[in-house]
Image: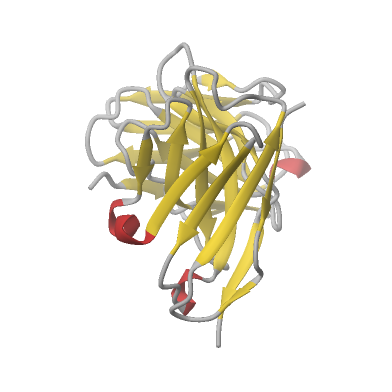
Amino acid sequence: QITLKESGPTLVKPTHALTLTCTFSGFSLTTTGVGVGWIRQPPGKALEWLALIYWNDDKRYRLSLKSRLTITKDTSKNQVVLIMTNMDPVDTATYYCARLFTSRRGGENFDYWGQGTLVTVSS
Amino acid sequence: DMQMTQSPSSLSAFVGDRVTITCRASQSIISHLNWYQQKPGKAPKLLIYAASSLQSGVPSRFSGDESGTDFTLTISSLQPEDFATYYCQQTYTTGYTFGQGTKLEIK
């Protein structure tokens, strides 16, 4: 059974950094073709992909947020950490982590998701 | 930047109706298109991957198709549990762009 769960602060002050941890089970981040990504969703708005880390430690970032994001993995702990610096009230959102899987038909998809964690940015 | 334009943004339908949601990519993405369903307060759920492949455990009333840069999600006979918001997503280019969503409501 594959599960993912996000953890981190629910409230962050403006200009401060946010650190989120995704703890997963049921798969390994050393398996070829597997990755873990972060996606966020502001209240009432659409999904927005943020960052992704692959089994081989290759990393991808949303272009508009690249300077503020860092993604790392700890395969021994089955965890992926996302750091977002210089938080602003517009970053208030539910943050999800999800497993990325590469299908044999080509393309990638997020096939398992965490429940999400709401992060509010406010002083 | 890759743009994914989803239409309509909202849709009202009856149980038993056949509905189709469209997603248009701003450039070729081959078949690297996924569809997700999201219910209020819940995480998205993968329905269709690679444009037309049904994710394991998803009812066969859901189907996906593609024609060039146009992609469709069809629900053949709406069930009460299908009323939700649907998102397309491209994974051909880094950016992994989602569409704006289509909210499907009961008429």
Residue B33 horizontal/vertical position (percent): 41, 30
Q: Position of residue B67 (x, y in %)?
A: 32, 24
- Residue visible at 47% across and 20% down in the picture: A33
Closer to us: A10 or A102? A10
- The reply, left or right, for residue B37 in relation to residue B31 is right
> Looking at the rendering, which quadrant does residue B22 occupy?
top left
The reply to whether residue B12 is in sight is no
Seen at 77% across and 43% down, the residue is: B80
Q: Give the residue drawn at x 36%, y 61%.
A: A68
Whether residue A67 sits left or right of residue A47 in the image: it is: left
* Position above or below: A78 against B14: above
* Residue sitting at x 38%, y 45%: B97
User: How far from the left and from the top, in percent, is residue B76?
Assistant: 62, 28
Horizontal and vertical percent for residue B19? 56, 38
> In the depicted view, which residue is nearer to us: B14 or A38?
A38
Q: In this rendering, would A25 be left or right of A50?
A: right
Corner quadrant of residue A80: top right
